[in-house]
Amino acid sequence: MPGLKVRLAGLEDTQRLGRCLARAVLESNPGAILLRGVLGAGKSALAGALARSLPGGERAEPSSPSFTLCNIYCTVPPVHHFDLYRLPDGSYFEALEESFADATVLTLVEWPEHLAQDAWPEDGISLLLARPSGFADRAGPDLSDEARVAEISAIGPGGGFFLRRLERFDFENV
């Protein structure tokens, strides 16, 4: 299944994508969302917008789990937000494995490339936040330093089902 590409002009669009993901999660929890991108790409901002947009999110206080490794938000579904940036590549992290195995939880993982490939979930989506191609050569108000493209792809059949749900939403009006 081909993935989705969403152009993000800045932080507001990144937060809008988080709200859109939350709506899709309520219809079909993908189980895991792997957030990839360079330092400062907007992974934590996206995760925070998603968590705040779920039922119970008004009580959540999303923040980057860079030092705690995991933040848990009491939303519906509960969100386990991991940041693996400080883990050595290929490290085993039991709490993450348990989160992947719990079908009632939405697991958000920043820096999943620090996990061994066989530790990735069987189902979910991978979301890469990257600068648009040709970024340095183009000008215009929509290509600020915060401009990104979100490339969303499925992991396993559950991720494919979620991606089809996500395609139905009107990103501009979320």
Image: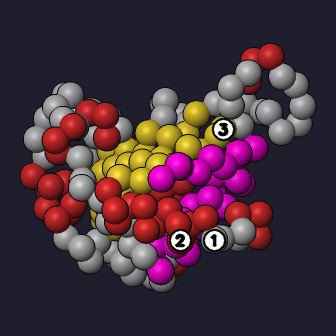
Magenta span: chief secondary structure: helix
Q: Is residue 123 visible?
A: yes
Residue 71 visible within the image? no
Q: Residue furthest front?
A: 1
Q: Give the amino acid type for the residue marked by disc 2 in the picture.
A: Arg
List x then y, in percent, for residue 100: 21, 60
Q: Secondary structure at mark 3?
A: strand
Q: Residue at x 46, y 73 (%)?
A: 25
Disc tally is: 3
Q: State yes or no: discs 1 and 3 in contact (Cβ < 8 Å).
A: no
Residue 142 appears left or right of 159: right
In the rendered image, which residue does mark 3 sit on? 148
Residue 18 percent location from the top left of the image: 57, 61
Q: Residue at x 53, y 49 (%)?
A: 3
Badge 1 or badge 3: first in the primary sequence: 3
Q: Quick one: label 3, few (<14), some, or many (20+) residues within 10 Å?
A: many
Residue at which label 2 appears: 165
- Magenta residues (range): 1-27
Residue 168 numbered mark, or none:
1
Label 1: how many Cα within 10 Å (few below 14, some 14–19, many 20+)? few
Choose top left, top right, bottom left or bottom right for residue 122: bottom left
- Nearer-the-camera pick, 65 or 31: 31
Q: Are marks 2 and 1 in contact (CB under 8 Å)?
A: yes
Determine if the magenta segment contains residue 127: no
Q: Does 52 sit left or right of 144 as displayed?
A: left
Residue appearing at x 21%, y 37% in the figure: 117
